[in-house]
Every structure is written in structure tokens, then in C-alpha cells.
Image (cartoon, rainbow, N blue to C red):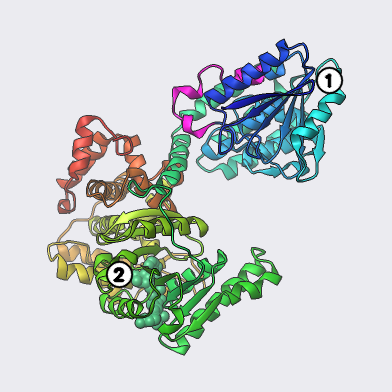
Amino acid sequence: MSADYTLHGAVAVITLDNPPVNGMGLATRTAAVDGLLRAQRDDAVTAIVITGANGVFSGGADIREFNSPKALAEPNLHTLIATAEGAVKPVIAAIHGVCMGGGLELSLGCHYSVAVVDAQVALPEVKLGLLPGAGGTQRLPRVLGLEAALDMIVTGKPVAAAKLPALFDELYPAGTDVVAAAVAFAGKIAAVRPLPKVRDRQATHADPAAFLQGARAAVAQAAGPYPAPLACVATVAASVEMPFEQGLVFERERFMYLIGTPESQALRHAFFAEREAGKVADVPPNTPKRPLARAAVIGAGTMGSGIATTLANAGIPVTLLETSQAALDRGLAGIRRYHENAVAKGRLKADQLAGRVGLVTGTLRFEDVAQADIVIEAVFEEMAAKEAVFRALDRVMKPGAILATNTSTLDVNRIAAFTTRPQDVVGLHFFSPAPVMKLLEIVRGAATGKDVLATVLALAKKLKKTGVVAGVCDGFIGNRMIEQYVRQAGFLLDEGCLPQQVDRAIEAFGFAMGPFRMSDLAGNDIGQAIRRRRAVERPDFTYSGTADRLCALGRFGQKTGAGWYDYAPGERTALPNAQVDAMIVAHAESLGLPRRAVPDEEIVERLVYALVNEGARILQEGIAQRASDIDMVYLTGYGFPLFRGGPMFYADSVGLPSVLAAIERFAAGTHGEAWTPAPLLVRLAAEGKTFNGR
Ligand code: NAI
């Protein structure tokens, strides 16, 4: 059943019913239109109430129908709204829970609407790079006034019904049975004619022209590369500048335009990618989960403290274990400072501080963490250190406890083999700073139990992270790809670039931070340690020697006040350094490489396609389950521009044959040894397919 029809005396009640949020899919729209027609045919009916089952009115479009012809099939949303608006008997929207997108547009087409005060109301289309395309931009300003309507449409933010009295004919206290109240309201207005229609009203503002001019300037500034917010302003402006019907046509035209923009396509891709990331083919949603009431973290350094803070922020009590009292005290003090700062910034209430800080306690003894349901190790990135910890955990932890490692590169299967319970071992790769970064790479070992995987996927949600599952390999998804990207950045220095040119070019492409600023932030010693390991494991692996020369100068990055750039004490602004630039030129000379002017376009292609080519290998090897998982890793963990949808989506949108042609060109040039096209890329390009659609 997708919309239920019942009679409450002389009032027909149509209940949208399409769990979880009564998305207005084809079946629901059809049943609602049928209900409206039936009620008008029935002489005993004097008024019609439209409401939603499951405690919500409607969340809007049915996302399962996105990208399917069903979305536009008749009766489409316009037809449903026109049927409600054109009804000869009063139609009342009875709103509770959630009323968003197309749901709100439907209610605006009804003659009346009533709501419970705590219902959440929004037009969130802009978040997918779109605008409300079923009359929302024309009707909302006519009800709320230009300013309030524009704010809701441009931000997409939900607002409580209580804050929007102009939108509702009656507002009820929380907990009211909205259907009973709407039926009572219907009794009062059943005979009133003519039926009020929003389209007959005027959008109001004291000085619309001046307001719209200011809004255009402010929104243009804030919108960045996205076209949707300005299109929202233009369509809302039409609500005062054009007759209603003409405004609707304009809204439709702008909506169709936005659907085709790469920015909206990228946002919609990311929206679905996020939902997909939580799914693992052989771990169905009904897989039993283990209880997670208490946690422990081993190591109170940068990551351990951050992870403990993240757990506490989700209300999970944590025991933090260190090797020395001094290190433990440092970690605990850092956690306290973090929370005090949160209070200062208004993110945490002062009276919650003690409780939040109190969720993290410290210890020096493994016995004290034995009863935790999950323990996350974050000690030094050395196999010997991991071995000592996992052997100790295996000895003390209660049966069934999940043993997780935050390693960024090491072999999770080897770590699991230090225990007698490899099924309980999993990688949980947090990113720095852990409380802030959205990405959580979940590394599935060969023996990791399905219930363990299901449990940590649920934990990711609880921590408000995007959990992406990766298989075991050096660097998993994110760091394995970034190594190729950083490697290209180094080669570009040898061929003629300076760090600031490389960073500027990729930041203009949209990255949050270029490779050299990123390395300075993370610490250049991290890359050095990886290169040293590579030199032993894969002696044929080439890379620019500039990074080693930089480390030889003691320039480890922001923490030493000097790296690829200089940093004033306490500042994060990257200032070019002449000594570094001279070192780069001298290094190129020592290689006998002529320096050339490298176009910014080549910089972007080499960095991004290095990610794409390695991503293709990761996909082919099954380290990532799907291309969109790789995109999620880069969008949420590495500052890849959201409006480009992630590296694999971006490659798809450029066209894989073009990407392959560029890679083949690079393979024939200087440092061509770094460019063997991934077989999957070659195959998909030949077959005319894409990574995301394969
Ligand atoms: P860190 O050097 O800041 O902290 C490591 C802490 O572990 C130190 O406080 C040390 O005293 C403690 N420790 C060492 N052995 C111990 C033992 N047996 N028992 C208890 N505590 C012990 O290191 P960081 O940066 O926090 O890294 C930790 C882990 O997280 C590493 O595996 C690293 O690869 C990984 N990681 C680091 C990221 C970063 O950005 N720093 C990002 C993601 C993962």
C-alpha cells in the first residue's frame, strides 16, 4: 500500500505510506491522485486531508527512483500538486515528523496546512545541486515572504514548524494526533469558498529589487563553484517579477538545466556513494552485531587521543592506555583542552564538560582494558610495536572483544596473526584530526568476522563517520593512491615546478590543500619513513630525491616551523623559501634534467590521473568494492573537491579514453616509468564504459 484512503465521518484521509519517509514514488503519487479523485466523486465527503504514515508527512522524492524514468512518469509530482490545488473540495495537508522537498511542495499546493510544532520543514534540493522543481520557488515566497523563503531554499536547512507560523493555518503542541486535529479543522472550513490558493497571493518584501540585488551578491560569493544557489535566487526572484504560471515555467527550465550540470551530478553521486559505502555484499543488514558499550584505546599520541575524544563525543566510555604516566597525562590533558575549546566555541555546553571529559579515563595496565567491548590500537607505526600490543591484548581481552588497529599502512593480516582470534581483528583507520575528519577506512582482514564488520560499520555511523571498507594492501585505498600522487608532485619539482606552483594549480582545481602544504602539515618525516621502507621492499621504485634532501635540512614541516615552506611561529600560512627553491633547482641539475615551464593543466592531470590509475588497480584487485567507495575516501579524507565527485567519478566525466591517452603520453615522457596504465582502465576505455557504471 503506498497511500491509504479512509473516511473519518465526512472527511476523506489520504495517508502517504512508503517507508521510511513516504518518498513520493510513482505508486504513492498514483494512489494519492486516485484518492483525491475518489474523494471528489463521493458526495458524502466534504473535505480531504493528506497526511503521512510512520509519523512523517513526506521526505520528498523517492530516492530509489532517482535516475529512473519512474521519477517523471505520470502522475508526476506536478500532476499530483495540480490535482490537490484544483480539487473542488478543500484539501488540507496534515504535517508531522518530516515535511521536505516535494513533500513541502505538495503541502504548498493544498488549500490549507496544519502541523505539529516539532515537524521539520525544508527544501533541501540545493544540497544536491538542484532547486525545488515542483513550484516550491514560486509558492514558498508567496507564503513566507521573499527573505525567509529565499533563506530556506538557498541553504536547504530544516526549520521547525514552530518557527514558520505563516506557513500553517493551525499549529499543534508536540505529540498531538495531527490527523484527528486536521479532521476537526476540516469541519470548520469545509463550507468556506472560494478555496484559498497560494498561487493567488503576492510574494512580499518592502524593497524586493534592493533585497534581490544584495542576495545575488552574497550568494554568488558563498556559492563557490556551484551554480544551484544562484539559480535558486533567480527563480525566487521570478516569484515577484513574473506571473505565477510564467514563474513555474522558468523554475522548470532552471531545474532541468541544473540536473545536467556536472556539479549537481557530482553531488548526487556523492549522496548515493555515501549510502552505498555502508553496504558490504556478503554482510547483509541483518547480520548480528556485537554489543559496544565500553571502549579502550592503546596509545595516547596524536591519533589515540583523537580517537578517544571521538568515542567520548558519541557517549562511549573509553579507557586510554599508555606506557608511561607522563605520556598518559599529556594525552588526557590534550583531550581536556579539546573539550574546553569546544565549550569556548559553543559546540559543547559548559555543564556537559565534566561529564564528557569524565568519559575518558587513563591506565598503564592492560588488565584495566580487559572488559572493553572494542579496543583500538594507535601506537607507533612499527610492526614490532603492534606485535607487542596485540599479543598483550590477546592475553587479557575478554572473549568476543573486537581488536582494532589504526595502522595506516601495515598488514592487518600479520597483526591478526599475533593473536589466537584473528576473526576479532579489524583495521579502523581514522584520519587526523580524528574528531573532525569524516573518513573511517575499515580494513577487512582475511579472517575478520562478518559480525565484527557489521559492528564496526554501525560504529562508524554512531561516530558520524563515513565508513568505507578496504581490503588488506599497503596503504589500503587512500594512502596507496596518495603515494602515487605525491610521487608525481616530486617529479614535477625535478622537471621545472616549484612547490607553490604545484599547490596553486591543484588548489585551483579545487583540492583543499596541495601536496606540499599537505606534507608539511602531516610531517615530512612520515613520507621519509615510507620511502625508506620502499627502498628495501621495492628497490626499483623511483621517486624524486628532493623530499629526502628537504628532510636532511631538518625541514619536517609545520611542527618544525619549516618544510617545503616556512611558517611563522603559531601560523599556518605557507611562505615560499628561497633555500628550498634553490635546493630543488640544484637537485634537478644533479640529475641532468633540463627545467621547463610545466603548464598548470599538466600538473592537474598528472596528480589526478596518478590517483585514478592507482584507483583502477585497487578496484580491479577488489581492495575497494566499488568505484564510488574510492570516491568517498577521497571526498571525505583527502580534500578532493566535492563538486568534482571524487577521482573515479571525475575520470568518468572526463571520459576514460581521454584519461588513458594522457597516461600513455606521460608514460612516453620524463619519469614515464611511473605510468603503466591499469589494465582495468584500458579495458573500460576500450569498451566505452565508466568506473562507476561498470
Ligand atoms: P604518536 O607517536 O603521536 O603516538 C603513539 C603513542 O603510542 C605514543 O604516545 C606512545 O607513547 C604510545 N605507545 C607506544 N607503544 C605503546 C604501547 N606498547 N602501549 C601503549 N602505548 C604505546 O603516533 P600517531 O601519529 O598517533 O600514530 C599512531 C598510529 O596511528 C600509527 O599506527 C599511525 O600510522 C596511525 N595513524 C597516524 C595518523 C596521523 O596523521 N598521525 C593518521 C592515521 C593513522
Asked whether, in this view, residue 193 is left or right of residue 404, the answer is right
Where residue 519 appears, x then y in whole percent? 36, 65
Where residue 33 appears, x then y in whole percent? 62, 18
Q: Quadrant of residue 379?
A: bottom left
**x 47%, y 33%: residue:** 64
Q: Which residue is tagged 2?
A: 421
Where residue 540 appears, x then y in whole percent? 12, 62
**x 21%, y 72%: residue:** 532
Asked whether, in this view, residue 91 is left or right of residue 333, the answer is right
Pointer 1 local density, CA inside 10 Å: few below 14, some 14–19, many at least 20? some
26, 134: nearer the viewer: 26
Q: Quadrant of residue 469?
A: bottom left
Q: Secondary structure at mark 1?
A: loop
Where residue 633 appears, x then y in whole percent? 38, 52
Q: Residue furthest left?
A: 540
In this view, the mark in front (1 or 2):
2
Asked whether, in this view, residue 416 is left or right of residue 459, the answer is left
Dot placed on the residue nearer the N-terminal end, 1 or 2: 1
Pointer 2 local density, CA inside 10 Å: few below 14, some 14–19, many at least 20? some
- Ligand 1 visible in quadrant: bottom left
| Above-or-below relation of 413 to 268 | below
Q: Amino acid at mark 2?
A: Arg
Q: CA distance from mark 1 to mark 2?
A: 69 Å
**x 15%, y 67%: residue:** 537
384, 446: nearer the viewer: 446
**Residue 278 seen in the current view:** yes
Q: Secondary structure at mark 2?
A: loop
| Above-or-below relation of 581 to 147 | below
Q: Which mark is residue 190?
A: 1
Q: Amino acid at mark 1?
A: Ala
